[in-house]
Every structure is written in C-alpha cells, then in structure tokens.
Image: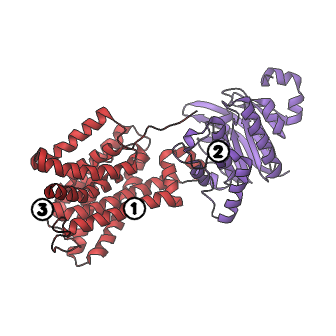
Chain colours: A red, B purple
Amino acid sequence: MIGVLNQVVSGIATGGIYASIALALVMIFLATHQINFAQGEIAMFSTYIALMLIQAGVPYWIAFLLTVTISFTMGMLLQRFVLEPLSNAPILASVGAFLGLLLIFNNIAGWIFGYSLKPFPTPFGAGEPMFGGMISRHEMGSTVVTLAVLVAIWAFFRFTKVGLAMRAAAYNPVSSRLVGIPVARMLALGWGLAAGIGAIAGMMVAPIVFLDPNMMAGVLLYAFAAALLGGITSPLGAVVGGVLMGVIENLAGAYVVGTELKLTTALVIIVVVLVFKPSGLFGKALASRV
Amino acid sequence: MPMLLEVKALHGAYGESKVLHGLDFVVEEGGVTTLLGANGAGKTTTLRAISGMLKTQGEILFAGKPIQGMKTEDITALGIAHVPDGRGTFMELTVEENLRLGSYTRNDKAAIAVDMARMFELFPRLKERLTQQAGTLSGGEQQMLAIARAMLLNPKLLLLDEPSFGLAPLIVREIFDILGRIVREARMSILVVEQNASLALSIADRAYLLETGRIMMSGTAADIAKDESLRRSYLGY
C-alpha cells in the first residue's frame, strides 16, 4: 500500500512537468489550431542555456530567471520570423516548420553541447526525502514551482487585460482586430509564454532524467497524451491530464507493464482518447445558437 | 457640416474579383448615413474597406487624415467601431468579457465604467446575462452585445453592418428603437448598411444607393424615402 502511495506521489511530481508542457501545447493550439511538435526541443535547448549559465558561476535562481527570459524572447522571435510568414500558408507548411524546428534544435544542441548525459543541479538540495521517505526534496520543490507557474498563468489569463486580449485573439482574430487588439503581437506573446513555461519544465525535469538532446522526447509524448486526455482545447484539462498522466505512467510502470513499456501507455491513451472521446475530459464541444 | 469620413474613388477586390468600382461618399459629423442596396451590391465590402480588412485603391479620409493601408487594429484605435456582419461575437467568452474587450483601446477606467453602466441601461438583457457564455445568446441578444461592444470603444464613427439580419421583426424594432436613442443622445456619427431600406431610412439623415459596387443615387433620407419610383425599383417596399 505504501508502495502504491509512493508511486502516486512521485507521479504527481512528474505529472506537474507534463502538465506544464501540455499547457504550452494547448496555448499554441488554441491560438493556431496546430500542435507545436518543437515545444519539447525548445524546452531542452533552454535547459542547456540554464546549465551553461550555472556552470559559468551564475547563481541558480538568477540563471533560472535569465533562462526563462531568454526562452520567452526566443519563442517570440520564432513566432515572428518563422511561423508568422506561414500564417496564410496551408497547414502542412506549418507542420513542416514545427518538425524542422524540432530537428534543428535537437541537432544544434547535440552539436554544441554533445550527446552525453549531463547531470543538472537541483536548487532544492539533495537531503533526506521528505514526509517519511515519500517524496524527494527535488520532487517536492519542482511540484511547488510547477504549481506556482500554473496558478500564475491561470491568473494572468483570467484577470489581466492582456490575458483576456490573448484569449480573444486566439478564439476570434477578426473580431479582435475590430476592437483594436494587435493580434500578431498577442500570438507572439503566446509563443513567448509557451517557451517560458517549457523552459521551467525543462529545468525541473532535468535533475530527474539528466540532460541530453533527447531529454524531452518522452516528456513531449506524455504531455501530448495529457493534453488530449484533458481535452486539447482546455487549459484546465491540460493540467489535470498532465497530473493524471504522471500518475498513470508510474502505476503502469510499477505494476502493469513494467518500466520498459511505460511510454507505450502514453501512446495507448492517445489512441483511446482519439477513438472514444476526441474532445477529452474537459474539452467540451462549444454550445452556440445562431 | 464638417466631414468625418470622406471616401473618394474607392476600388476594392477580393483577390481577382472586383467588388467596388470607384465609390464616392461622405459621412457627416454627428449624422446617420446609410448605404442601401441589394445582396452583393458591395455594402459589407465598403465597410470592410474602411476598416482596412481588404486591399483597396482610392482614398479614405477619416477626420481629414488618410487611413488607407493602415492595420485594422490601428484604424479601430482612431475611433472607428465596426459591428461586422455575423455580429463578431466572441462565442467562447462571457458576455462581460465581450464587453470588456470593447474598451480594449481605452485606459480611462472611470469613463469606461460610466459607459458600461449606460450600456446596461440601454440593453438590460445583457446585464442579466453577464456571466453567460456569449455563444449561448440568441441572435438578437448577440446583436445587442455587438452594438454595446462597439459603443464601449467610445467611437467617433460607428459602422453597422445589417443590424437587422436574421432577426425577428419584433427584435429588429427593439434594436432600431435603441439605435434611435443612441443617435439622439450620443455625439458620434453612424454609417449603417441595410437591406431593409425603410428601417434604415427611418433613422438616417443621408442615404446612398449602392448597386454592384457603384453609387447609383444619393440624397437626404427623407427625399429618398419619398421617391416613389426609386422605392419600388430599388428598395422593394
């Protein structure tokens, strides 16, 4: 029984990271109706930037903030110079661009930083696990950070004028321009935020899985499954789906299919959701009258 | 009267198909101007051209300044509110959020609150439905929401695209009564496009008759409404 509880708790910790990446995917999906396959690789690349800063002697939390800022800027620039020019092109052009970005970031990371696994420091200390050995300090810390990020993002979209304008621009760009919202700028902001969230997720997962250019491949798959499970149109669904995915992954790995086949559960969930409930748990079909 | 909007030799096209063939018209400051015409005459396209939603040739002057080639959001920020065809509702957002978006370009919080209260006075139904998802409103309510949203920009010029479209006669009457009140009380100009000519002429000062992208006729609303043959052949009532 303790074992199960253990798996659930540490599942929630990794689930938070999946939730972050899933939220980033959902944000871009709502704005563009496309899945940014490069989301994970951008996060991985950002984590290398963080490692570089830390190795250069920058204190962890300053490196953390710098990395988020750099990633945010990188996301905005990618939108402005890669995706914006394709905004009127057929959908396959964007899909190609996303896959291209995935390969480019992956290869540049390998080229600059090498393909060997690198340890990544945790800011939460390596001391004794907490709550009677239930959860490591890093898992606890990263859960808190992830939760804080998710709450901040929710509050931003819910309560600020810019957040409302970003939602409006995502749902109805034509009407948004007619009330004076600069839609392209909102889209760039969305990309910046998504990249920033990804960077935080990368820095939180790296101490657990070690840093290498393929670090985020698995994470992206779990996050994609999480986003679909929660409903690809629902930010709340992404968060719930992410946590569920983390727990399912752990329980399946420990008791059902074994660690070697863990990743398969993500694929199974993707297929099952798409076949039986494409709108996911929270992505409701929109009610509308004409 | 000084001119708020001057349109000179306006040509417009969607891709290869030309829709506007050299329009000339003006909107006076403080008045209601209406563009009448059948389906496909270019009414909606004319409003879109003013809002910078399609590529045009010719000249569009707003308060004496050329606005052609500007981005839609920048034209809006100058004080041109556009109630588009189809009403442009943000379906997924609440009624309240729809209204807040209307004042997006403004920063005068106190004045926005006053205007918001004024809208609830004009459209009490919107107040009852503040937290409701806007997509669940009826067509008439969505039209009211669209007008209220546009008014919250505190515009100098209000562009209305077929406010009567697809609505029951009773609701249309209600909406035009409210528009009449807005016209009498607010200090702004309105350019309204309508298929329902008698309705539009009832609130307009000046009217233009549009046919396949050209102005066929213009005059005061009263004169146009009186012209028997014109009414029968073009306005159909």
Residue A261: x %, y % from top left: 12, 45
Residue B12: x %, y % from top left: 63, 37
Give the mark nearest the N terminus, 1 or 3. Answer: 3
Residue B201: x %, y % from top left: 82, 34
**Residue with the mark numbered 3:** A117
Amino acid carrying mark 3 in the image: Leu
Name the residue: 83% across, 35% down: B202
User: Cα distance, mark 1 to mark 2?
Assistant: 31 Å
Q: Residues within 10 Å of mark 3 (few under 14, many from 20)?
A: few
Quadrant of the frame with the C terminus of chain A:
top right
Say the numbered circle drawn on residue B224.
none
> For this view, does A83 lie left or right of residue A118?
right
Count of marks placed on residues? 3
Amino acid carrying mark 1 in the image: Val
Name the residue: 66% across, 51% down: B67
Towards the viewer: A46 or A210: A210
**Residue A108 appears in the picture as rendered:** no
Q: Chain of mark 1?
A: A
**Residue with the mark numbered 1:** A151
Secondary structure type for disc 3: loop
Are the residues at dot 1 and dot 2 in contact (C-beta closer than 8 Å)? no
Amino acid carrying mark 2 in the image: Leu
Q: Is residue B117 above or below residue A175?
A: below
> For this view, does B28 lie left or right of residue B125?
right
Say the numbered circle drawn on residue B145.
2
